[in-house]
Structure formats: structure tokens, C-alpha cells
Amino acid sequence: MPQPVSKRYLRLFNELAKEEGITWKQDANQNGLPDPEEVQLGAQWRKLNAKAKSARLTNTAYSIFSRVEERRRAAVQEALKEKYLKPYRFAWNPRALPEPVQQALPKFMEISELTEELQLLQLDPSGLEWMAQVRNGARQSYKPEIPAGDLASWKLFQRGYGRVYQFEGGCHRYTEDPFCDPVGSFPDWDPNSVMWADDIRTTDDLQKLAGHLQEALLMSPFTVVEKGPEGKFKITEYNQHPLFKSRLVRIAELFGEIAALPGFSGLEPDMAQTAVAYAQALERGQGPRFLDDAEITWAKARGRHIAFTWGPFEEPQDPHGIKRSFQFHLFSVRQEASEELEQFQQAVLQEMENRLAARVEGYEAANVSVPSVIQVYDVIERSGGVNNSGGEYLAAVIPNSGPVVEGGYRKKQIYANMNEGVFENVLRPLAARSIDPAQLKYVQPRFLTLGSTLHELSHSIGPTENQTVKQNGKEIPIKTAMGAGLFGALEEAKADVGGVWMYPLLRQKGLISEEDEKAGYVTFVANRLRSIRFGSTSPHGRGANAQLGYLFETGVVEFQEVDAADGGKETRLHVNLDKMPQAVEAMTVEIAAAQNQGSKEAAEQFLAHAEQIPQDWDKVFVPRFDDIPRHIKLEVQVQTPPPEKEASHEAGFNCGCNLGARP
Ligand SMILES: [Zn+2]
């Protein structure tokens, strides 16, 4: 039933109604509808008789109502974005780098720009057009214009990044099925075989499969799929497609130029070698997997001053984990911190894997001692997939499929400036309002960063997603057996608690102190409070809820009344530090066992620990956190130091971390 309308609503309505020739003077009878006697109508209405006029007025009004709603929603979302995503400025001084490395920077920036364009091309052949429109303000965001009912085009778009953008209307605009899932509907679909199918090695293999686009290559990361004029699908490798090729050729040139900069390869031997590997692959590469070798070179490379990541990589927001989007990252390396973490990895990883295997029935310890690269970076520039999906991560292990994984070289990247920004803007204020004041000294930025690192290390222990389990006489990957959503939530929880379980071992090995271990535990608890705010639909949020529930259940955390600033009492969270090691060990074992069996029931049982969070949690803490942002948006400000005797100033060069800011 319509509600009587407010003056404000009337104004919004009339703004949109103008082009329809309608002015709604007032809702005199308060029925929420513009009745013929309440409106003034333009010339286009004159020819209609009273009955037709009334019918058309009602129809037009409803269509305007929905547009008004859309506008209001957009305005609210804008406001929420501000509230939840606080801009975090990070100042970076490139002049601190050695001269030859500085000279590489403009070339990396050009690669970044080209990569942005490549990803937009991947999104949709009209991606570049959108980009131009977004830049000149004609469009707010990227959105495809797919005719309703054109399921083939819709699937094509989904093959790109439709899902990542979660654009309005969703799948059901194109099918009758409100739960339509174009990926899930492929028969006997197996994510691993789709993306890195062993039989897709050559151009011929691709062409043979062209007849089955709906089933396989629609999702392949190696090709451009377009719908031809007769509605037939055509597939082309990236380096053969004219729009992609011209950009890839330029990127190859730039990589070549970077490697050839005088003095560069002496200062950055690994990065120079990687740049050469990519340049050669892009120039001479054949077949759909022409980047494989270059990617392995990259995965083994350590930066000394700077490091980069380039290529089609997984889109973390893709729930099926099968798409690869072009993306670029430029980092400034924190050398000392990187070395420390490599040492931690060597010292504990294999031993943790062995300890876990000893406690999980039927799980055999894997060899995880391959020294895969782990580096601590400040994020300086990013573009393509990482930029457009809204992903701002604290750390990442990439890639998750392909030859790098098979070789055991997955690269671990810890984003130090992101961690510090999150600590200052989110974690510190959350802890200040919730943790026992006597334990606040243990909430420290170093242990958010170290926690992120141990989280990433812990992804390497226990069952992996490709491990199989027998179901109905068939071997299927445990990820498929559990379902991607459940698996993801468990995997993130395992990384969280498995990481904390490493603290005692690090202390026993003399790598951290007893006080450090305590800081690790309390910072971990505070960080649960941050993670649960991402909600139970995100894998991180869902896993964090279960962990917090478990911590309450086992008495590791409890409510405590403390003296408040106003002289009264206040409820805070106290951490019983001595109980933590056993709890995180037990959680890790419970999760790994569920994964090892590929058991949905066991996974759900673990997640049900979330029910142990006390009932008045929401009443006690949630209102206190209301004005604390959820996350940050990194804005890198490139600072050039003042010429001698001049006052310090910031150069007006925003690194172009989002499209809008790019000149
Ligand atoms: Zn993770």
C-alpha cells in the first residue's frame, strides 16, 4: 500500500517526472499516488481521454517511484562507503630509492595503466568504452548493457567479471531462475580441470574445444571469448587478439626497457630477470599457457628495493576461484622484515605441518619445506583486478592454481602499509573500547602484521583444496565435496587459528619473547572483533564468528566489569592468556579433520561454535563500534623531498590508485 508522501519525496519525484510532463503538486488525499486532480500535465498528455490519462499516470508514477528508490539507495550507499571505508594516506618517497630503480618507476606506471585497460577489456569488449565514460563523468560505474533474456551474452559477461562487480539486477534479470548461477550450472563442473585443464596446452587444443564453449572455455583464463555476428562464439588467445595484443606488445617493450636500464639489474637482479622473462614470453609466446615460465620466474623472485606482480591472477572475490584477471602491483620492499619472516617460515612451517598431521586421523604430513618466497611490502601502485574489485588486502598468497602451485612456489606477500593503516584506523579504536584496559598494552601493530603473516603461512599446512575424497565411488576435490562457500570459511578460519598456534613454537625457538607471545594472543582477539564485522556472508567473517564463539565456550575470553571513565562500570573483554595455546590447537585440528574428510556436516559443526557468543554481545559492543570504519582505502601519496633550503611540500602526483585520480 502506498504511503502518504513527504515534501522531500515530492521534490525527488518531480525532478524525475519533469521529462514525462508531470508535476505533482501535492498528495491531497494522502493515498501516496499522483491522482489526476493533484497533477499538472504537459502537452504530451492532452490527446488522452480521462480513463487513458489516469491509467498512464499510474503506470508512469510507479516507474518513477522505482527510480526514486534507486536514487535514494545510491545516496545511502555513497554515505556508507565513506563510513565503512576510511581513506588512509600513505606517504612514500621514491627519491629514497637508488637512481636506476627510480628510473624504472615511470615505466612501471605505464604498465599499470595498460594493465588497467587489459582488465577492462577482459570485463567486456566494451570495457574501454566504459572506462572513457567513467573518466569523463558520463557513467558512475562499469555496467554492461545486455538485453534481457540474452543468456548467452550474460554468460559471456560472467566469464569476465560480472560476478565480481555484483552488478544490480543480478543473474535473474536474464533467466527465470532467481538462484541462477551460470558457473554452477555447467554439467559435472570441476573448477580445477576447467582452469588448468592439462589437455589445454596448444592453440589446437583450444580450437578443438571451441565447440564446447558453454562447458569449458567460457571460464578459461587464457582466451578472449566473443560472440560473433551470427551469435557463434569465437575464441582467441590474448596475445593473438588485436586489442589485447597491442597492449601486451607495449608491456613487453616496457619490461625490456626496465631490465636494460643501466645499473638496474645489479641492484634488482631478480626483478630484472622477471622483467626479461615476461618480455620474452609476451614477444615470442605461443599457445594459451605462454606465461607459465615467466610466472615461475616471478614466483621465485625477491625484490631488494621494489617488487612487482603482473599478469592474469585469480580474482579473490570470485566465489568459484576460477577466473584470472589482469592485474598489476608495484611494491616497495621492507628488506629487514622480509628476512625475519623467511626465518620464521623456515623455523616452524614443516614442524607445524608434522604436528597437525600427528593429530588429524588419516592425514599425512606433506613436504612444505620448499622455501617459497615471503616478502613484506608497502603497496605503492595497483591496477586491474586488484583495483576494480574493491579488494584491499592485508596479505596474499598467489597464485592458487597452475604451475607455480604445482612446483610449490606460491608467493607470500605481506602488505605492511595496509596492516598499519588498518591498525590505526580500525583495530586500535575497536580494542580501546572493548579489551580489558589492563591488557590493552598487548594490542600492537607489529602483531597485526605478524598475525597476517602467520595466517598466510598457515594456509600452507593441512589439507589443500585439491586433495580428493571418495564420494559415491568417485574421487572429487574436497573443496567440491564441501562446497566452495563452506570450504572457504573453514580455510580462512584454519589460517587464522593455525597462525596463532605457531606463537608458542616461535617462542620456544627463541624467535619471539614471552611478552611478544602475549601480544600475539590479545591482538588476535581484538582482530576477531574486526573480522566479525565483515558479516557472516564473507568467509573471513563467518570463520571469525566461529572462533570467537569457541573462545567464549572454552573460557579463553570472558566478559569482565571494569571501572569506566565516568566512574561507573563497563563490560570489557578479558583474555585468559594461558588457555589460548590449547584452544587454537584444538580449533586447527577440528578444522583440518573436517577438511580431510571433505565433510559438510563437520564443517557446519565447527561454524556452529558461533552460537556460543553471548547473547548480549550485540547490545554491549556493537553500538560502541558504530563510528569506527570497517576498513580502509589506501591512497598513496608520492612525496618528493624539498630541494635544498626550501620548505617541505607534497608533490601533486597521486599515484593513480584509482581511475578517477589518474590524470
Ligand atoms: Zn586467508
Image (cartoon, rainbow, N blue to C red):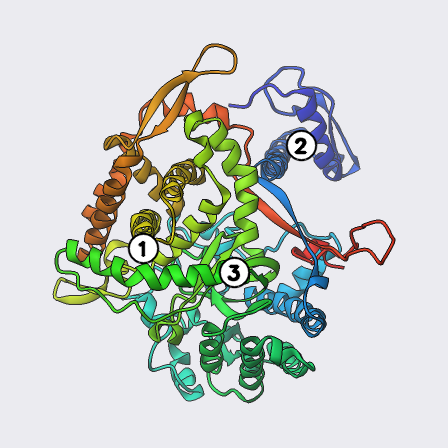
**Cα distance between the residues tagged 3 and 2:** 76 Å
Which residue occupies 41% across, 48% down?
Answer: 451
- Crowd around label 3: few <14 · some 14–19 · many ≥20 (10 Å): few
Residue 328 in the image: x percent, y percent? 58, 66
Taking the image as shown, residue 319 lies to the left or right of residue 47, namely left
Q: Which residue is mark 2?
A: 53
Under circle 2, the secondary element is: helix
- Crowd around label 1: few <14 · some 14–19 · many ≥20 (10 Å): few
- Crowd around label 2: few <14 · some 14–19 · many ≥20 (10 Å): some
Which residue occupies 34% across, 74% down?
Answer: 406
Q: Which residue is mark 3?
A: 336
Q: Nearer the viewer, residue 6 or 73?
A: 73
In the image, residue 144 above or below residue 72: below
State which mark lies toward you, 3 or 2.
3
In the image, residue 629 above or below residue 104: above
Taking the image as shown, residue 170 lies to the left or right of residue 283, namely left
Q: Quadrant of residue 598?
A: bottom left
The amino acid on which the numbered mark 3 sits, given as a three-letter code, is Glu
**Cα distance between the residues tagged 1 and 3:** 19 Å
Q: Nearer the viewer, residue 290 or 78?
A: 290
- Going from N to C along the chain, the mark reached first, 3 or 2, is 2
| Quadrant of the snapshot with the C terminus | bottom right
In the image, residue 651 above or below residue 497: below
Which residue occupies 39% across, 37% down?
Answer: 522
Which disc is residue 509 wearing? 1
- Going from N to C along the chain, the mark reached first, 1 or 2, is 2
The amino acid on which the numbered mark 1 sits, given as a three-letter code, is Lys
Under circle 3, the secondary element is: helix
Q: Check the image and name the residue furthest to the right.
A: 645
Residue 180 in the image: x percent, y percent? 38, 53
Which residue occupies 40% across, 62% down?
Answer: 343
